[in-house]
Image: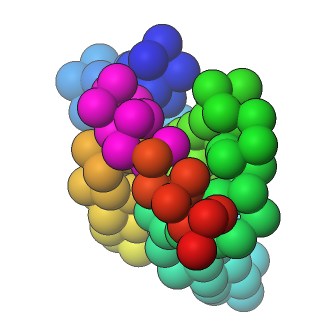
């Protein structure tokens, strides 16, 4: 739970500093268009890969088997991995949005990532559901 809220607090702090306190974080605003294009393309591809991966992580056979075998310990491990995938992506897109002087692509990617965060919110009900689903999937 702390990891989830911490992953949201750091980008929120950057947002407050950039938008309301007018802290100049545009350290990459003078870089070449090629660098901007490459970084933007890499972040788009990372977002397109990591968001669906994080949302479907508990559907993979290896993760299901691990959840069935080790239970709560595995759930904590895979839950942290999922939160870190989305949280780090959100942080990277937020930092790059301000570093490239309000580049819209990074802002949109950060918003899309932020919109996926409620789907991995670590509640006890979700943990029980995913653990039970993993146990049923391992038996089948």
Residue 83's place in the image compared with 59, above or below, is above
Residue 25 located left or right of residue 68: left
Residue 96's place in the image compared with 84, above or below, is below
Residue most extreme to the top: 2
Q: Residue at x 30, y 51 (%)?
A: 119
- Start and end of the magenta stretch? 121-131
Where residue 104 sits, quadrant-wise, is bottom left
Q: Residue at x 26, y 55 (%)?
A: 115
Q: Is residue 48 visible?
A: yes
Q: Is residue 89 visible?
A: no
Q: Position of residue 110 (x, y in %)?
A: 39, 56
The quadrant the C terminus occupies is bottom right
Q: Nearer the viewer, residue 57 or 114?
A: 57
| Residue 113 magenta | no
Q: Position of residue 103 (x, y in %)?
A: 42, 65
**Dominant SS type (magenta):** helix
Q: Nearer the viewer, residue 140 or 66?
A: 140
């Amino acid at each position: 739970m702390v990891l989830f809220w911490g992953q949201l607090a750091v980008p929120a702090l950057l947002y407050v500093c950039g938008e309301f306190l007018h802290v100049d974080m545009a350290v990459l605003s003078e870089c070449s268009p090629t660098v901007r294009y490459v970084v933007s393309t890499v972040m788009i591809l990372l977002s397109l890969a990591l968001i669906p991966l994080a949302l479907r992580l508990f559907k993979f056979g290896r993760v299901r088997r691990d959840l069935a075998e080790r239970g709560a310990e595995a759930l904590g491990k895979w839950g942290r991995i999922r939160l870190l995938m989305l949280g780090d992506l959100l942080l990277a897109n937020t930092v790059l949005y301000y570093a490239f002087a309000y580049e819209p692509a990074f802002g949109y990617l950060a918003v899309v990532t932020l919109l996926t965060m409620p789907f991995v919110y670590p509640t006890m009900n979700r943990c029980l559901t995913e653990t039970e689903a993993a146990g049923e999937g391992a038996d089948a």
